[in-house]
Amino acid sequence: MGLTPFPTDVGVGIVCHNNRDKLAATLASLETAHCPQSAITIVDIASTDGTVDWLASVYPGIRIERLARNEGPNPGRNALIRDCAFPYLFLMDADVQVAPETIQRLRRAMGSDPNIKIGSPIVVHADAPDRIQYAGGSLHFICEAINPWMDRPLAERGVEPRDIGVAPACGLLLDRQAAIDVGLFDERSFMGKDDGDFTHRMRLAGHRILEVPEALVFHQSRPRGTWLFYYQIRNRWHFMLKNYQGRTLVLILPCLLVHEPLQMVFLHLKGYGRVYWRAVGGLLRLLPSLGRDRAFTKRIRTVPDAALLKSDSLIVRGDLVGNTVGRAAKGAYEGALRGYWRLLTATGLEG
């Protein structure tokens, strides 16, 4: 049985920064998927490894745009969404490869319901394609990612498509207009919770994110450095302050009054105290625009926080959790958060 033709209403957008060593495999996977070069646009973000010259010589049919400054992937992502000539855009990172039918399957699944505005593949490790990196994502009410399938066997996930709460931006099929309507990616984020913020806004605007397990992308994943802590800390608070309903912020305040001091002390003990206070300063610099941000979120919102937020196991780096005692403490803390969330949702968080 032959490969399904590549959808004529889908463009492909790739963001890269010094990814010359990975782009060949990425573009080869798109060629195997029968994606024409004319449907591909690459935004190069201030690369210094010869990426642009190599692309121009080897892939003359691909459109290339350059950004002179590295301000994270989001300006490039937004440029790809705004400038796409197709109603749908498969947005991907340069270190991701698609399985031959991935984009076709996502497009077919999105066609089953006009409320599906994001088609999300299962993300597996390129060096261990039988193991999941991201699947079944949702958002914890204290604004941490929930990734229940992380490092579990792909075979256990099954083949049933499911609605999810948030999705990683390393590979997503987007309804272009819906992405524009919810404000695109926040270019102030640089990195860290930026894809969660974007996909969460799609959900609070009433759109579905459908995860299609028979659509796979292979991510050349690597451990993230501690340099990202600044953005994760700052962006998490900014995420909550601009996206959560006022009622939600008040009701989860008791948990935050425990979580934030714990996080602060923990990071200081691990040697990241200066990073923590730098992140606090970075957050303060974002606050002047908070009123405008919250007004925009209120304008697009059709779904309350109670329908979007959850409580489940938190993702914490193994080197930070530490020994058996640390893991036990983490489990007890997660249990307390679950109990509090059940209490809130049983007593009227809706509204």
Image: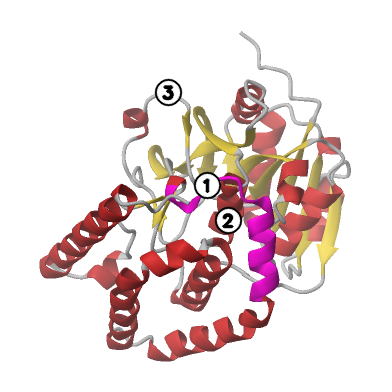
As drawn, 286 above or below 333: below
Splitting the image into 4 quarters, where does residue 16 fall? bottom right
What amino acid type is highlighted by mark number 1?
Answer: Ala
Residue 73 visible, this angle: no
Q: Which residue is mark 3?
A: 159
What amino acid type is highlighted by mark number 2?
Answer: Asp
Q: Magenta stretch?
A: 290-306
Q: CA distance from mark 2 to mark 1?
A: 7 Å
State the residue in front, 201 or 61: 201
Q: Which residue is mark 1?
A: 167
Q: Position of residue 85 (x, y in %)?
A: 87, 40
Splitting the image into 4 quarters, where does residue 333 fall? bottom left
Q: Secondary structure at mark 1?
A: loop
| Circle 2/circle 1 CB separation < 8 Å | yes
Q: Residue, x 71% and y 55% (percent of image)?
A: 184
Q: Which residue is mark 2?
A: 195
Q: Is residue 203 left or right of residue 52?
A: left
What amino acid type is highlighted by mark number 3?
Answer: Val
| Circle 3/circle 2 CB separation < 8 Å | no
Q: Is residue 296 magenta?
A: yes
Q: Secondary structure at mark 3?
A: loop
Q: Secondary structure at mark 2?
A: helix
> What is the quadrant of the N terminus in the image?
top right
Q: Residue, x 77% and y 49% (percent of image)?
A: 81
